[in-house]
Image: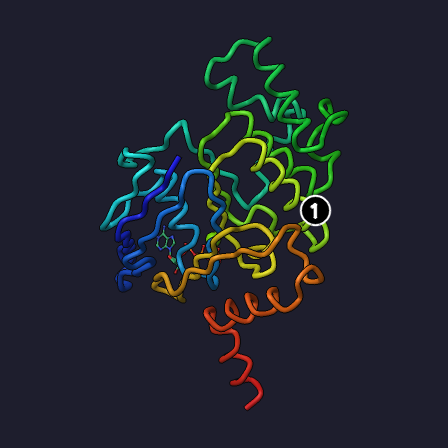
Amino acid sequence: MQLTLKSVSKVFPGGAGGAPVTALEDIAFTVASGEFVAVLGPSGCGKSTLLEIIAGLSSPSAGEILLGDELVSSPSSHVSVVFQEDSTFPWRTVADNVGFGLQMRGVRKAEREHAVARAIELVGLSGFEGRYPHQLSGGMRQRVAIARTLVLNPAVMLMDEPFGALDEQTRFVIGEELLRIWDATGCTIFFVTHSLHEAVQLADRIVVLSARPGRVKRIFENHLPRPRVETEDPRAYAELMAGLRDAIGLTQAATRVKA
Ligand SMILES: Nc1ncnc2c1ncn2[C@@H]1O[C@H](COP(=O)(O)OP(=O)(O)OP(=O)(O)O)[C@@H](O)[C@H]1O
Ligand SMILES: [Mg+2]
């Protein structure tokens, strides 16, 4: 399902006599059906705000979001969100966490069990169905969060730094798993990250936002062959990374530090 962002702006009113904050300004791009797009930008540039607007959890101050041909004004059953923070229910087992959304939708138990088993298998957690979140590692809990999203069979997955709390190696491994799932389901993915390496590993297109107010600074096409590890094609990898660093302003910052 295609996602179209048309001149989206967001201004938060200033509380307690403070000035209003313009978080996003004139954001426009399209995520094609089945595409994997990463949004990269400095802290506070409005990435989460943008994701919430796309999810229909918050409304833009100007502009609009289209999901297919439909205007987004409230959360859609075609869209699922994976948040950064651990959002598993500690009192529910893995299987009951994953089945929660289906239960809410009123899906019958037998049907639910089948879908839950499949989603758990997809994220590589078979055998852990009866465990509770505190009996799992952070990476496994994030897999539960992904399975809980997948089970709803969303056309669009919105992910807000879902692997931010994980170490680099675990992050890479789960990233590869996400790519496999994306390949198997054909869903559209909008993925927010701070990490240049993660954006390069995962996305076909990388949208770089400027510091607040967030504007689209540049959009990079990523044609590197998968798996995208530095050693596959070091020159092309280095070139893309250098372009991203430059767009984000990391090269100027490094020069300033040196001077
Ligand atoms: N509900 C709100 N009320 C007022 N201002 C807000 C609100 N939510 C976000 N902001 C402001 O909007 C800006 C963008 O916030 P947002 O959380 O979208 O940034 P972000 O890019 O996701 O940052 P990070 O990378 O740190 O998660 C920030 O300056 C923040 O203070
Ligand atoms: Mg954020």
- Identified by mark 1, the residue type is Val
The tally of labels here is: 1
Relative depth, front residue between 97 and 161: 161
Relative depth, front residue between 143 and 4: 4
Q: Residue at x 44, y 61 (%)?
A: 208
- The reply to whether the residue tagged 1 has its Cβ within 8 angstroms of ligand 1 is no
Q: Residue at x 55, y 22 (%)?
A: 100
Instruction: State which quadrant residue 97 falls in.
Output: top right
Q: Position of residue 10 (x, y in %)?
A: 29, 53
Q: Residue at x 33, y 42 (%)?
A: 58
Q: Position of residue 129 (x, y in %)?
A: 71, 23
Q: Position of residue 246 (x, y in %)?
A: 49, 73
Name of the residue lying farthest toward the bottom: 259
Q: How is the image coloured?
A: rainbow
Q: Position of residue 3 (x, y in %)?
A: 36, 41
From this view, report whether residue 64 is shown above or below residue 24. above
Dot 1, how many residues are within 10 Å of its Cα: few (below 14), some (14-19), or many (20+)? few
Please give the residue where the numbered disc 1 appears in the rendered image. 173
From this view, report whether residue 104 is shown above or below residue 136. above
Locate residue 174 relative to residue 20 in the image: left or right: right
Locate residue 138 relative to residue 199 in the image: left or right: right
Quadrant (top left/top right/bottom left/bottom right) for the N terminus:
top left
Q: Tag 1's secondary structure?
A: helix
From this view, report whether residue 158 is shown above or below residue 92. below
